Amino acid sequence: MSILIVGIGSYWWVNRAPVTKNDLKTEIKVPKRVPEKENSAPKNKLVAVDIQGAVKKPGVYQLKENSLVQTAIQLAGGLADNADTKQINQAKRVSDQMQVYVPVIGSSSNVSTSTSATGEKVNINNAKAEDFKNVTGIGPKKAEKIIAFREKNGNFKSLHDLTKVSGIGEKSLDSLKDQLTV
């Protein structure tokens, strides 16, 4: 039996793979994590939205920035039975200090979600062209330029950003700032 063990051991010793010393060093490269652009505003910023009209619990509610009008209506208890949903855009994004008015069926409400009455400031981040008609110094062409700029570049961070719109300078901004808001 010992001869068998010695024979197997000798066979293994002779036929084994030669051991070579490897001086190569191996490294595993992990790609660097590219940092995302830092926003000046926190991602979960809350905004105040005033929900009025044909909802079950009208009032001011706080929502995450860029939530939908539909979410604001749900927070207000949902639509009343007599709500006219054809006159509102539930897919619109909310912004701070926005008022959402849900009209009653049969009413011819022209109230937008940016202003509720003449004399109030127009929110440049959600106003339509017709919302600018009562703003002294902004005609239909400038209103379209403001909206086009907003759609291309996103919401305005401050009123001063209006100076980036063609045709609006510092002097124009000074005369407009009491009539507009972001």
Image (tube, rainbow, N blue to C red):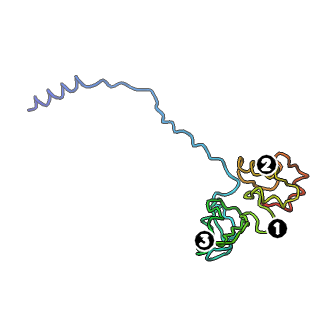
Percent across and percent down for residue 175 are 90, 57
**Amino acid bearing label 3:** Leu
In primary-sequence order, the first of circles 3 and 2 is 3
Which quadrant: the C terminus?
Answer: bottom right
Between residues 2 and 28, which one lies in front from this camera angle? Answer: 28
Q: Is 144 positioned to the left or the right of 63 in the image?
A: right
Left or right, residue 28 beside residue 122: left
C-alpha distance separating marks 3 and 2: 34 Å
> Picture quarter containing residue 19?
top left
8 versus 145 height, above or below: above
Find disc 3 in the rendering and name its residue: 75
Q: Residues within 10 Å of mark 3 (few under 14, many from 20)?
A: some
**In contact (CB < 8 Å): disc 3 and disc 2:** no
Q: Nearer the viewer, mark 3 or mark 2?
A: 2
Residue 136 place in picture, x, y as percent: 88, 59
Between the residue at mark 1 and the residue at mark 2, the CA separation in whole angstroms equals: 22 Å
**What is the three-letter code of the residue carrying label 2?**
Lys
Q: Which residue is mark 2?
A: 145
Which label sits on residue 118?
A: 1
**66 or 3, which is in the foreground?**
66
* Mark whose residue sits in front, 1 or 3: 1
